[in-house]
């Protein structure tokens, strides 16, 4: 059985950095893309690794070959749509063991938990 058997197509959104124009903030353009990932519920250790303000959110783990943009200072994280809800990519964990290289991401629900 292939590792990719458990993956499903997910819709993602990348938000470019915003900028100030004549003293007014202008949000960056948003582009959409699709990628394949395995979705799993986050565990207790995953929740503890989140920033404090995200620990009460609904959180999932994504396993994928696709490089996503995770939350960082001065950078807009990618958004993903799971089960008709929008989630923000909060953490990235690259797995580079030269057997099945991939990324593990934690995504937290945007808005109310």
Image (cartoon, grey):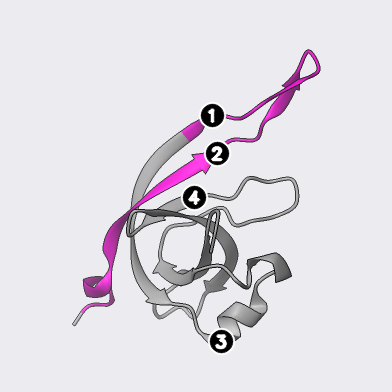
Query: CB atoms at circles 4 and 1 under 8 Å apart?
Result: no
Q: Is residue 13 above or below residue 45?
A: above
Whether residue 42 is situated above or below residue 32 in the rendered picture: below
Q: Residues within 10 Å of mark 4 (few under 14, many from 20)?
A: many
Say which label, 4 or 2, has the lower sequence index: 2
Q: Residue at x 28, y 77 (%)?
A: 3
Which residue in the protein does label 3 denote?
44
In the rendered structure, which segment of residues is drawn in magenta?
2-30
User: Magenta span has 62?
Assistant: no
Residue at the outermost right position? 23
Q: CA distance from mark 3 to mark 4?
A: 23 Å
The residue that disc 4 covers is 79
- Real-space Cα distance between discs 4 and 1? 13 Å
Nearer to me, 109 or 38: 109
Please tell me which of labels 1 and 2 falls first in the chain.
Answer: 2
**Residue farthest along the front direction in this orientation:** 112
- Of tags 3 and 4, the one toward the viewer is 3
Residue assigned mark 2: 15
Residue 50 horizontal/vertical position (percent): 65, 72
From the image, tell me which residue sits under label 1.
29
The residue carrying pointer 3 sits among few (fewer than 14), some (14 to 19) or many (20 or more) residues within 10 Å by Cα, namely few
How far apart marks 4 and 2 lie (CA) works out to 8 Å
Badges 4 and 2: C-beta atoms under 8 Å apart? yes
Residue at 60% x, 30% y: name it. Answer: 28
């Amino acid at each position: 059985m292939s590792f990719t058997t458990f993956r499903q197509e997910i819709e993602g959104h990348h938000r470019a950095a915003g900028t100030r124009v004549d003293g007014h903030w202008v949000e960056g353009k948003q582009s959409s893309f699709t990628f394949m990932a395995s979705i799993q519920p986050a565990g207790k250790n995953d929740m503890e690794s989140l920033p404090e303000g995200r620990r009460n959110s609904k959180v999932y783990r994504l396993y994928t070959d696709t490089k996503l943009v995770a939350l960082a200072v001065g950078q807009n994280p990618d958004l993903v749509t799971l089960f008709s809800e929008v989630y923000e990519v909060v953490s990235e964990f690259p797995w580079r063991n030269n057997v099945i290289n991939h990324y593990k991401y934690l995504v937290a629900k945007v808005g109310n938990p």
